[in-house]
Amino acid sequence: MNDDRKPAGSEPWTGYHAGMPAPPPAQPEGGGPHRARGWIALLVAMLVSLALVGTLLAFTGGPQTAAPPAIPSTGAIVPPSPSSGSTATSPVGTIVDINTSQQAVGADGLRPLGAGTGMVLTADGEILTNNHVVEGASSIQVTIPGHGSSTATVVGVDPTDDVALLRLNSSSGLPTVAVGDSSTVRVGDPITAIGNAFGRGGQPTATTGTVAAVHRSITARDPSGTSSERLNDVIQIAADVHPGDSGGALLNVQGQVVGIITAGPSQSSGNGTGFAIPINAAIGIVNEIRAGHGSSTILLGERGFMGVAVQPVDPATAAQLGLTDTAGILVAGVQPGSPAAKVGMTAPAVIRTIDGQAVNTLDELGAAIHSKVPGEQIQVTWIDQQGEHTATVTLVAGPAV
């Protein structure tokens, strides 16, 4: 059970949103751990332009709140050596780099979207990562040390708990991580955090530290403050975590995975704090996905795509369209040939309802579409300079949720 009491000394601090991955590999003039995220798909293909330069991550405490200092030993390495007598370790090649691209509205070809980390669960190519690492991706490339790169598809995701299961195309004989038991994790335990720090690729980097707290609840907000993500029962670690480590492995001294790195500070040097999803919870979600058990939180396979770039309605645009309020969601762009374009939707416009239900936030609009699969239909009502329109939109396959 989570205790929402705020631990002493835990004022809100600058961090990157648990729902947003690291920057793609740096361009020649790149200067730091930030990423221009063009049009973010809400799977509905509501692609929102965001510049990720760091965010506010506020967290509240759990039953265990001791916070040992970080042990900032960072370098490019493989998982730590196991303790004497242990055989269940995660071998080299089990921690992978994930790079994503996205088809932006009105653009030709794919644009880099982000970079993160994943873990090989099965020899035939199941990959575990965070949902936010692949969110909005039109293309997912996974690079496995010693095995090259392969395209991956999304088997299923749980956006609420920030877990995604991917599958590589035509893979076999891959080394796999050793999955531990996160219920045995205790404050003060030595740990190693391994990931694709800053999206640089190559051998993963490893940072050693200790467990600072368990059963923590955190709330991560995006830079604009318009969206946040609540994660419960996470492990807090006293170790540097960087953008790009998202989806990476938190290992115990036996080299077993006990958590998935999901959040940390935005500063390029880190601040000795990070958070990880317990592996027991993640594997529980994976097993539901494997069994084909979709739910209100677990989404299986491809989801619907409408083909619009959206953002909150601002007063100036509302006035331009003759509206007296800012209710609804502003359509800032429409993908040529998309389902939205086929029913005559153009920008600027304001979407008021989906299937008769009002949508006033990006999350509400996304939720209205996330429950649909390609081929299903939705009824959309929108307003533009020509007046109010209602049409039935047939969704197609789109980016990851």
Image (cartoon, rainbow, N blue to C red):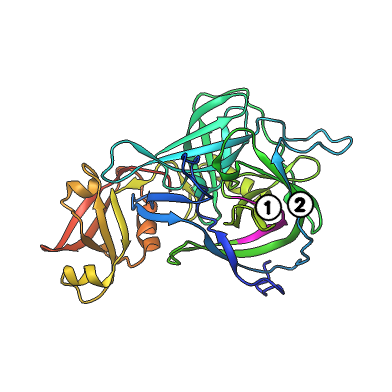
Q: Which residue corresponds to mark 1? A: 240
Which residue, as the protein is rendered here, is positioned at the far bottom? 324
**Residue 217 inside the magenta-drawn segment:** no
Which numbered marker is on residue 209? 2
Q: Is residue 257 visible?
A: yes
Q: Is residue 342 left or right of residue 78?
A: left
On the image, the x and y values in percent for residue 119 come to 62, 38
Q: Is residue 377 left or right of residue 385?
A: right
How far apart in space, not on screen, are marks 1 and 2 (Cα)?
8 Å
Q: Compare residues 241 and 357 and report the one nearer the observer.
A: 241
Which residues lie in the magenta part?
A: 232-242
On the image, the x and y values in percent for residue 221 come to 50, 64
On the image, the x and y values in percent for residue 232 come to 61, 62
> Which badge, 1 or 2, is on the more N-terminal residue?
2
Q: Is residue 205 left or right of residue 349?
A: right
Q: Is residue 371 visible?
A: no
**Residue 235 inside the magenta-drawn segment:** yes
Dot 1 alpha-carbon crowd within 10 angstroms: few under 14, some 14 to 19, many 20 or more: many
Which numbered marker is on residue 139? none
Label 2 SS? strand
Q: Considering the whole magenta stretch, tell me its main secondary structure.
A: strand
In this rendering, the answer to whether 261 lies above or below 323 is: above
In this rendering, the answer to whether 270 lies above or below 77 is: below
On the image, the x and y values in percent for residue 343 come to 17, 50
Which residue, as the protein is rendered here, is positioned at the far left? 386
Label 1 SS? loop
Picture residue at 76% right of the left edge, 64% below the top: 67
Picture residue at 66% right of the left edge, 60% below the top: 233
Circles 1 and 2 in contact, beta carbons < 8 Å: yes
Amino acid type, mark 2: Gly
